[in-house]
Image (cartoon, helix red, strand yellow):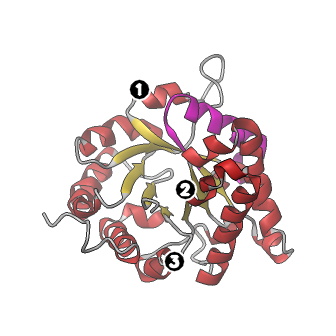
Amino acid sequence: MRKPVLIGNWKMNGSLQANQALMVRLLPRLRMFRKSMDLAVCPPLPYLFQVRDLLGYTGIALGAQNASAFVSGAYTGEVSATMLQEMGCRYVLVGHSERRTLYGETNQDVAARFRAVMSVGLTPVLCVGESLEEREADQTSTVVANQIQAVIDEVGLSSLAKGVVAYEPVWAIGTGRTATPEQVSMVHQDIRSFVGRNASEASQDISDALRIIYGGSVKPENAFDLFGLADVDGGLIGGASLHSEDFGAIAGALAEASGLLTDECETN
């Protein structure tokens, strides 16, 4: 059974005071789920040290929102995976749609960042997804496959499987629009099938082991239906992760949908 994973992406939000208040409210809500799923939060870079200290020994991981493809050098404004490792990060997002669309990161750029993150022992979270125009042109499967293939070409299939793939339709991020369970299920099945077709007979279990999570206007109201889909292994949560009640409720929905709410969650 694939272990569920839930990651909060704070994007460019927060302050020292706001972060402190959020974590004080959030950590008690997540405590009961920390053994039944992998949990992480990805604050903006300046707050990594603060949030790391607030997380302490809770078992909830620290993540970063991006990493350079380079180890060091004259790359003003970039941060290396080695630096993030030293800060205590465990996860790093790569290829988020906002990085692709606003900052021009190509599939090859994202693949290089994936390699850099994995090379220092951190877990890359590969974000993939199509624009509204691409969906309406029936190009979703091709776009997502190309995004994944670039990483396979860079690091190989077995390395891809050590990361996490996050499907986030661009048209459903921060727009209030949510893909239907049927749409999500179809893309997640396509991803797993695509990875399976790339695997040799000796490594067919790679596609079964790959964790594929969903992001895109996930809220407490729709989380259970999304997480109950067979090939959805958790979520990458944006705006709702900034609200302790919402993120806690989403974690509860993931535990319930995964059949872990009463079996494996801590009771105190």
> Which numbered dot is residue 226?
3
Q: CA distance from mark 2 to mark 1?
A: 28 Å
Residue at point 63%, 39% (across, down) = 114
Up-down relation of residue 130 to residue 62 (above or below): below
Indicate which disc, 3 or 2, sits on the residue closer to the N terminus. 2
**Separation (CA) of disc 3 from disc 2:** 19 Å
1 and 3 marks in contact (CB < 8 Å): no
Q: Earlier in the sequence, mark 1 or mark 3?
A: 1
Left or right: residue 28 versus residue 230 is: left
Where residue 73 appears, x then y in whole percent?
63, 16
The magenta stretch is 101-125
Q: Residue at x 59, y 58 (%)?
A: 166
Marks 1 and 3, how far apart at CA:
35 Å
Main SS type for the magenta part? Answer: helix
Task: Reply yes or no: does residue 109 show up in magenta.
Answer: yes
Is residue 112 or residue 241 the one in the foreground?
A: 112
Question: Residue reaching furthest left?
Answer: 268
Report which residue position mark 2 lands on. 209
Q: Nearer the viewer, residue 93 or 1?
A: 1
Q: Amino acid at mark 2?
A: Ala
- Provide residue 64's location: percent of width, then percent of height: 48, 42
Q: Position of residue 119 (x, y in %)?
A: 57, 29
Secondary element type, mark 1: helix
Quadrant assignment for the N terminus: bottom left
The residue pinned by badge 1 equals 86
Name the amino acid, label 3.
Leu
Is the residue under label 1 in contact with that under label 2 (CB below 8 Å)? no
Quadrant of residue 162 in the image?
Answer: top right
